[in-house]
Image (spheres, helix red, strand yellow):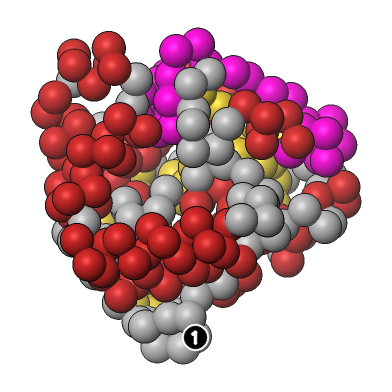
Amino acid sequence: MTHSITTTVLPDGLELAYRRWGAGQAAGRALLIHPLALDGSLWAPVAARLAEAGLDVVAPDCRGHGQSGKAPGPYSVQQFGSDMEALLEHLGWENAIVAGCSMGGCVAQAFALAAPRRLAGLVLVDTTAWYGPEAPRNWGERAEKARTGGLAAMSGFQATRWFSDAWRGANPGVVANVAGIFVANDLACYAASCDMLGKADLREGLEHIAVPTTVIVGEEDYATPVSASEDLVRRIPGATLSILPGARHLTLVECPDAVATALLEIASLAPARA
């Protein structure tokens, strides 16, 4: 299914780009938020299936990413969440099912905590509420590695974390495309985003989320392991957990049918609000 790319201007003047599938459809609305250093295009296989099922689907490029404006940091996940709320205002959406992968999952949690009335359902993919006590140092080291060695030098390692060995070997074109998006990042924005994730702690308040929620994680996800997803499920009332066998960190790319199925199940549980 084809999709369009357009932009809107956020309250601070930054231009936010987004892709849309199934515009105007009435079965539900879904907002899909991408991982660090990537963009909304990664959601295309999932979004196409959602649109075929009748949903109106939008996948933005977060600030500092993809085709959106490259405003300097510092960033916060709360700021990124506010950007998503502004996008819903622009779209005229009262609420949406919100799904986020990795960094996008942190942004989705920030959105859920700040704007609960706009949340119809929540899908958290390969993510965490908190990267742990060493996160500021670890993310700072990653940012410094990018500054000194460049993103191209990191792309091979990233690919092994993103995808399982067998899937990577069978899909070299897709891997190359994702790596190309990664390498094209603005270094300053990448560093600001790393700093943002190092400081993020979304644990407080998750117990108040009151919409249908599911958490998805790859069995071999080393970046945000199964234990992080289990913690999310413990914190969010009624949340369910799906562990995808053999998959790693970008299950939205490696297992799009499973992710789409989970999203459609959440949509079926929250039809009135979606």
In this view of the protein, which residue sits in the foreground, 138 or 262?
138
- Quadrant in which the C terminus appears: top right
Residue 25 seen in the current view = yes
Q: Identify the residue shown where x is 35% and y is 33%.
A: 162
Residue stretch rendered in magenta on the structure: 232-257
| Percent x, y of residue 185 | 23, 62
Q: Identify the residue shown where x is 42% and y is 72%.
A: 192
In this view of the protein, which residue sits in the foreground, 98 or 182?
182
231 vs 147, left or right, is right
**Residue 259, placed above or below residue 188:** above
Residue density around tag 1, few if under 14, some if 14–19, many if 20 or more, within 10 Å: few
Residue occupying the far bottom of the picture: 12
- Quadrant in which the N terminus appears: top left
Amino acid of disc 1: Pro
Identify residue for label 1: 11
146 vs 230, left or right, is left
Q: Identify the residue shown where x is 58% and y is 57%.
A: 135
Q: Quadrant of residue 234?
A: top right
